[in-house]
Structure formats: C-alpha cells, structure tokens
Image (spheres, helix red, strand yellow):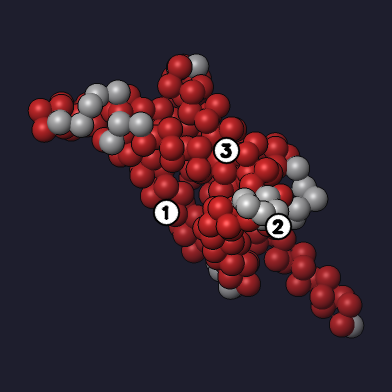
Amino acid sequence: MKQWFWQLLSLLGTTGFLTMVVFFLAGVYMSKGVFYLTGKKPFARIAGLLLIFPRYMVLVVKKILVKRWSFPELLLFIFIYNSVSVYTGFISGFIPGLPYFLIFFTGLNIGLVSLLTDPRAGTFLLLLNPVAILEILAVGIAYSNGLMLSVFPFTVTVFQEKLILYTELFPVIYRYSLPLLLMAACLESGMIILMKKLENRDSSDQSS
C-alpha cells in the first residue's frame, strides 16, 4: 500500500497530469461564463447548446436520488459510470489532440451541473469535496496517459505502434485510476444513502 501511494504521487507530478488538470480547471472556470450567457444575445443559443448535456445530467442525478438504492447497487452504478468515463478519456488518445478537448469539456460540464443544481454555490467549492478530488485524480491520470497516445499522428503504421503503447499504459489505469474511482464511489454512495435517511427521518418527524 505504501509503495502504491508513492507511485501514485509520482504520477501526479508528471507534466501530462498537470497539463490535464489545467485544462480541466479551465473548463470549470469557463462554466460560470457560459451559465450567465444563457440569457444574453447573441450568445444565448451557443450557451443553450452547451447546457444540453449538463441539464440531462441534472435530471439523471435527480432520478438517482429518488430511486431506492441499496449501498452495493449505488456503488456499482457510480463506479461503472465513472470507469467508462475514465476509459473513454484514456482511449481518446488514439485521436491526436482529443484528450485536451474532452478534459476541458469534462470540467465545463461538471461546473455547469454544479451551477444548475445551485447557482449560488461557487464552482470551485466542489473541488473541496473529497469525492471530487478522488475522481479528478483518477480522470487526470487516465487523460494524461491518453495524452501520451495522442502525441503520434494518426496513420496506419503509427496506429499499430499506439496499440503497443496502449497495452503498456493500460495497467496504469486499473492500478491507479480504478482504485481511486472505487474509493470515490464508496464515499459518494455512503453520503447519498445517509442524506436520504436523514431526509426520511425529518419528513417522518414533521408528519408525526
């Protein structure tokens, strides 16, 4: 465990990881501007298009909160969903430059979801959440490895070389990104179930 932790820290100090974090934070920062442009012409239509996916995600989150989940069910759902997102970030490196685009829009969408949920909350306050910190670390590692795939141009010969590099980099994802996502899913599932129990207790107290 100690060795895993020190190896994780070494990954967090790489140029690729720090670059991905900068692009992610840039997306989070831009989300506030996009959110407040929704009612201002001529940018309202563009801002509206950028808000389509975040609005959909808010509806999904609300449905998750309404549904009665057991802890294992919720943990598995969150873990699988985030794992797919992380893996997508990793394989995006097969297309040059795509990791930059995706990590930026990941930050943008997370910021917009936060603002749609509570416009008064600061977008960067969500980064103080331990769940968000673990997920950002996992995403950053995956995208930084995708960035290593992305440095080569897209040709048939180079694609074969990318496949070889993919097999060398993929173990980093399941050794570091997936454990971080599992820890985040455990925390998030526990927080959601605890919050629902407290809400049910308050409602039962009010009815009595």
Q: As shown in the figure, which amino acid type bears the numbered disc 2? A: Gly
Camera-near label (1 vs 2) is 2
Marks 3,2: beta carbons within 8 A:
no
Lower position in the chain sequence, tag 1 or tag 2: 2
Q: Nearer the viewer, residue 33 or 198?
A: 33
Q: Residues within 10 Å of mark 2 (few under 14, many from 20)?
A: few
Q: Earlier in the sequence, mark 3 or mark 2?
A: 3
Instruction: Using the image, determine if residue 53 lies above or below residue 137.
Output: below
Q: Residue furthest left?
A: 157
Residue at image position (76%, 72%) is 200
Q: Quadrant of residue 38?
A: bottom right
Rendering coords of residue 128 (x, y %): 70, 37
In the displayed orientation, state which residue is furthest to the bottom: 208
Which residue matches tag 1?
A: 80
Label 3, residues with CA under 10 Å away: few <14, some 14-19, many ≥20? many
Instruction: Identify which amino acid the numbered label 1 is placed on.
Output: Ile
- Residue 53 in view here: yes
Please tell me in which quadrant of the rendered image residue 141 appears. top left
Residue at mark 3: 27
Quick one: SS at disc 3?
helix
For mark 2, what is the residue?
A: 39
Determine the CA span between mark 1 and mark 3: 24 Å
Residue 124 placement, left or right of 10: right
Element under label 2?
Answer: loop
